[in-house]
Amino acid sequence: MLSRRNFLVASMAVGVASRVCAQTSDAAPTVLRLERRDIEVNGKSASVFCIRQPDGTFGIITDVGKPFRVRVENNIGEPSLIHWHGLTPPWRQDGVPETSGLTIPPGGSADYDFPLRRGGTYWMHSHYGLQEQLLLSAPLIIRDGSENPSRQEVVVILADFNFTPPDQILAQLQSRQTHDMRGMDMHGAEMPAMESEPRLNDVQYDAFLANSRTLADPEVVKVEPGGRVRLRIINASSMSAYNIDLGQLEGDLIAVDGIRVQPVRGHNFPVTVAQRLDIELTIPKIASAFPVLAVLEGERTQTGIVLLAGKGQVTRISGMAEVASPPLTLGLERSLRAAEPLADREADRTHVLNLTGSMQGYRWSFNNVPWSKDVPPLIVTEGERVELAVANQTMMPHPVHLHGHSFQVVAIDGHRFAGAVRDTVLVPPKTTVTVAFDAGNPGWWPFHCHLLYHQHAGMFATLRYA
Ligand SMILES: [Cu+2]
């Protein structure tokens, strides 16, 4: 019988495989197709990607305790590979071309099979090239029994969208250093005057999408007056962070990145790139429309969906908020407490990782070393408690993500606390965030900035242990 690793590689090699083995699985895998589709944005048609099942379902909703038994079929006419963001699979099934596996050729497929030990709101996205920018992403929801039949579940997946192709966006970002671009027509990119000021949103987008739609034609979800709703918000944007504005509604934040926290009540919650928020709401006992908005940080631009209670009227919602939303801070992060913190333990090993780079030339790195396959991995030994002290020396915020593990936020600028357990944390300019994890999943694991063009420009490192 093939080992799981050989099985995965073998089935990739044979392309669309009809031979998923009776001996390794007793149930048929869920098929996820990578496909092209057309959406309408700002009145124009746009060709983007999607990940959906043959019945049209985007992504997956499954249950904890079931195996994650999936076949990915690549129908987009170019190589691809899908990463299961927030899950902790065996590393060969992590879906990263450089570190964990072969890409799936056009017309080919790959099979995945590993246990799901924990529920929560996760997502999946291409880790190949810049495909994520073209919406090659989808929800990955693992129900864990905390769902209540009387509580309606609403998934909101946020994305930033540009008619400019992603490779041109990257080229524009990289070419900006040689001249003063101020005043030049640089669609899709904008140049800062100096790097003494914190800098947000270095790609200018044509639209922001919630469930693939703008506020010109938002998704409207029917809810019961007086009913209860659980929002599962996924920020699948390539470069954009938001403040979630619940308007008249008040919500309880019960999980971040799929993992429980002690509930925090509020109207407004920040969500940086790749993070998720689970928010429980009670709908007022009136017939009305309740927008759930995501306002781009530092800007007025917004997107969102509408919860429609009873026979309420949906009125047109502007794509611009009345006031700009503030830059994201760690105010909420500081106040979060894990529902189940890591065991109290001294670190066996601490790595200091400086986030380095500059808008000039668009060079981004860890410790001034842009990623290549020749960069040695960080050393870790199985069984250790490891801390990563991530010090942002740049003038841009960076959301950093660790593959294959969850970490706990244990310090901000040296002030220690037992913060949230999660997989992606924001590191604002001139700030140090320390995270801790237990090295219990051997393999070769990326740790990177989740801003797509920063990652692509080299802000990517790995750790490896056997
Ligand atoms: Cu970054």
Image: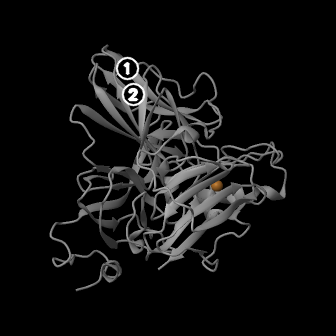
Q: Is the CB atom of the residue marked by disc 2 within 8 angstroms of ligand 1's nearest atom?
A: no
What colour scheme was applied to this rendering of the protein? Answer: one colour
Q: Is the CB atom of the residue marked by disc 1 within 8 angstroms of ligand 1's nearest atom?
A: no
Which disc is residue 88 wearing?
A: none
Q: Residues within 10 Å of mark 1 (few under 14, many from 20)?
A: many
From this view, report whether residue 104 is shown above or below residue 365: below
Q: Is residue 450 visible?
A: no
Assign ligand 1 to one image quadrant. Answer: bottom right
Residue ID for mark 1: 289
Residue type highlighted by circle 1: Ala
Q: Give the Cα separation between the discs numbered 1 and 2.
A: 6 Å
Q: Residues within 10 Å of mark 2 (few under 14, many from 20)?
A: many
Taking depth in this image into account, of 303 and 405 the one nearest to the observer is 405
Q: Do callouts 1 and 2 mark residues in contact (Cβ within 8 Å)?
A: yes
Q: Earlier in the sequence, mark 1 or mark 2?
A: 1
Residue at screen point 64% across, 71% down: 371
Q: Secondary structure at mark 1?
A: strand
Taking depth in this image into account, of 431 and 238 the one nearest to the observer is 431
**Quarter of the figure with residue 392:** bottom right
- 119 left or right of 359 in image: left
**How far from the left and from the top, in percent, is residue 235?**
48, 45
**How far from the left and from the top, in percent, is residue 360?**
79, 57
- 366 left or right of 447 in image: right
